[in-house]
Image (cartoon, helix red, strand yellow):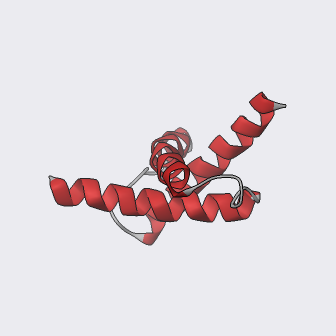
Amino acid sequence: MIINIVLWVILGLIAGWIASVIMGTRRQQGTGTDIVLGILGAVLGGLIMSLFGSPGITGFNVYSLLVATLGAVVLIYLRRLLST
């Protein structure tokens, strides 16, 4: 159980960091925000992928990292829309 939580945090950190680099928000947010965006992005990315008939997060692998990053990018974009 604990190892799963640690893996989700690591996956979230990596996905959130990649998304912040893609969206150019790296200097504006910290590691904690990267983790939160990555984990929430994994949930959102899974929902988005299920709308297209594809699996969401399938474990600790590259596909899941891409799905989580996609979700985190969408979250950063939505945050930008709401803050302007």
Number of marks in the rendered image: 0
Q: Residue at x 49, y 65 (%)?
A: 14
In the rendered structure, the answer to whether residue 78 lies left or right of residue 46 reads right
Q: Residue at x 19, y 60 (%)?
A: 3
Measured as percent of width and height from the top left, residue 5 is found at 26, 53
Measured as percent of width and height from the top left, residue 65 is found at 48, 63
Q: Residue furthest left?
A: 1
Q: Residue furthest bottom?
A: 62
In the rendered structure, the answer to whether residue 58 lies left or right of residue 43 reads left
Measured as percent of width and height from the top left, residue 10 is found at 38, 63
Q: Residue at x 76, y 60 (%)?
A: 24
| On screen, residue 11 above or below 76 | below
Measured as percent of width and height from the top left, residue 30 is found at 58, 55
| Location of the C terminus (image quadrant) | top right
Q: Residue at x 72, y 55 (%)?
A: 25
Q: Is residue 35 visible?
A: yes
| On screen, residue 18 above or below 50 | below
Q: Is residue 58 visible?
A: no
In the rendered structure, the answer to whether residue 75 lies left or right of residue 36 reads right
Q: Depth check: 72 or 47 in front?
A: 72
Q: Residue furthest right?
A: 84
